[in-house]
Amino acid sequence: MSRPRIYIETTVVSYLTARPSRDLIVAAHQQVTSMWWSRFRDEFDCYVSELVIQEASAGDTEAAAHRLEAIRGIPSLGLSEDALRLAEDLVAQGAIPRGAAEDALHVAVAAMNGMDYLVTWNCRHIANARMRIEIAEVCLAAGCEAPVICTPEELTEE
């Protein structure tokens, strides 16, 4: 039996590699991410995308190096024409807000590549219960199935 396929969005990598936050909620997310990465990640076939690599490369050079090191060796999915078209549809149909085109692209790449899960800490535009239904409907209309969109915490067995 094959392992579930999971798309790791940039916020997960950022929380994994960032200096510990003094904000209690962010610190808790960082701790959950670290625990998931070390204990549960190997239960999945993990993927990132060219977009994740671009986003992880941005900003402070030392922090970017840590992010890129964390995802080194994880296969990268390309940004296909179908994914770009689906991302446009997600925004045009209001499933994801206009100002969040990169977030739509993460969803589209994961959906077009048949990922079972998209793991993220972006609860504003991606892992948002109110948006998940609309995202799934737009993906179905485009001929693909939306991945289960969740946080690392939702992918633990504890």
Image (cartoon, rainbow, N blue to C red):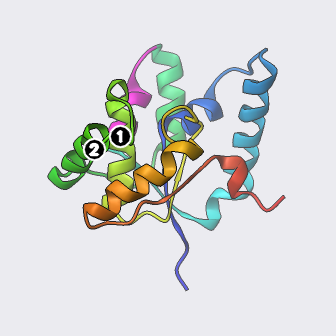
Q: Which residue is mark 1?
A: 104
10 Å neighbourhood of mark 1: few (<14), some, or many (≥20)? many
- In the picture provided, is 147 more to the left or to the right than 86? right
- Label 1 sits on what residue type? Ala
Disc 2 secondary structure class: helix
Q: Is residue 124 visible?
A: yes
The local secondary structure at tag 1 comes to: helix
Stretch in magenta: 51-59
Q: Which residue is located at x 19 percent, y 52 percent?
A: 80
Q: CA distance from mark 2 to mark 1?
A: 5 Å
Labels 2 & 1 near each other (Cβ < 8 A): yes
Residue 67 position (above or below residue 147): above
Residue found at x 53% / y 20%: 63
Q: Is residue 94 magenta?
A: no
Q: Which residue is mark 2?
A: 87
Q: Which mark is residue 29?
A: none
Which residue is painted at 39% across and 48% down in the image? 107
Residue situated in front as seen by the camera: 145 or 49:
145
User: In the rendered structure, which amino acid carries the disc numbered 2?
Assistant: Ala
**Quadrant the N terminus occupies:** bottom right
In terms of depth relative to the viewer, which is nearer, 23 or 123?
123
Instruction: Please name whichever residue, 149 or 42, is drawn nearer the observer in this view of the structure.
Output: 149
Quadrant where the C terminus lies? bottom right
